Amino acid sequence: MTEAIPTLKITDAEWEIMRVVWAQGKATSREITQVLEDKMNWKTSTIKTLISRLVEKGALDTEQEGRKYIYSAKLTEEASLDDSISDMLARICNKKAGEVIGDMLTNAPLSQSDIEELMSILKEKKKTALDVVACDCVSGQCECQVNLGGELNE
């Protein structure tokens, strides 16, 4: 069973491995290779190196069965996505979060039920929404905090 573990920095290439393991539940390196070899144009040795890194990072659990190893995720896909989103939002000015989320919605393929769920979330969020989102950047780190004569523009 997967569990939440502390935030791990997973590279884009490692995400590809994790997606296979999350989808399969458990997978051997051969099964992972079969899925990714053509898609990513990777050699088997590259895939095995990435698997090893994920084991070392604590993202994958290893179970030996005869001569083969079976890998399972030690962290959930949902927790990993949440961490990735939180990390992305921490890199931008608070004032730009709505714009970034809007861009994500514009570019994401969404079903009617996805849109209904998002509308419900927004309806609830509106109840506690701020009139103005405050910038939390240090002076000079974003456009809304341009230092002019010692005063900050907001």
Image (cartoon, helix red, strand yellow):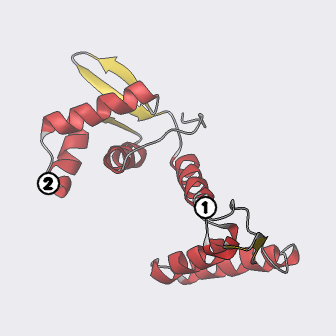
Element type at marker 2? helix
In the image, 109 versus 93, the foreground residue is 93
Amino acid type shown at disc 1: Leu
Q: Is 100 placed left or right of 129 in the picture?
A: left
Q: Would residue 121 be visible to someone looking at this image?
A: yes
Camera-side mark, 2 or 1: 1
In the image, 50 versus 69, the foreground residue is 50
Element type at marker 1? helix
Q: Is residue 12 above or below residue 49?
A: below
Q: Position of residue 53 (x, y in %)?
A: 34, 30
Q: Is residue 54 above or below residue 150?
A: above
Q: Residue at x 78, y 80 (%)?
A: 123
Number of other residues with Cα within 10 Å of mark 2, as a class: few under 14, some 14 to 19, many 20 or more: few
Q: Residue at x 38, y 49 (%)?
A: 19
Amino acid type shown at disc 2: Asp
List the residue tagged with mark 2.
Answer: 38
List the residue tagged with mark 1.
Answer: 89
Q: Residue at x 37, y 21 (%)?
A: 63
> In the rendered image, which quarter contains the N terminus?
top right
Q: Position of residue 18 (x, y in %)?
A: 38, 44
Q: Is 144 placed left or right of 150 in the picture?
A: left
In the image, 124 versus 25, the foreground residue is 124
Q: Position of residue 65 (x, y in %)?
A: 30, 19
Q: Is residue 49 above or below residue 132?
A: above
| Cα gap from disc 2 to disc 1, whole angstroms | 33 Å
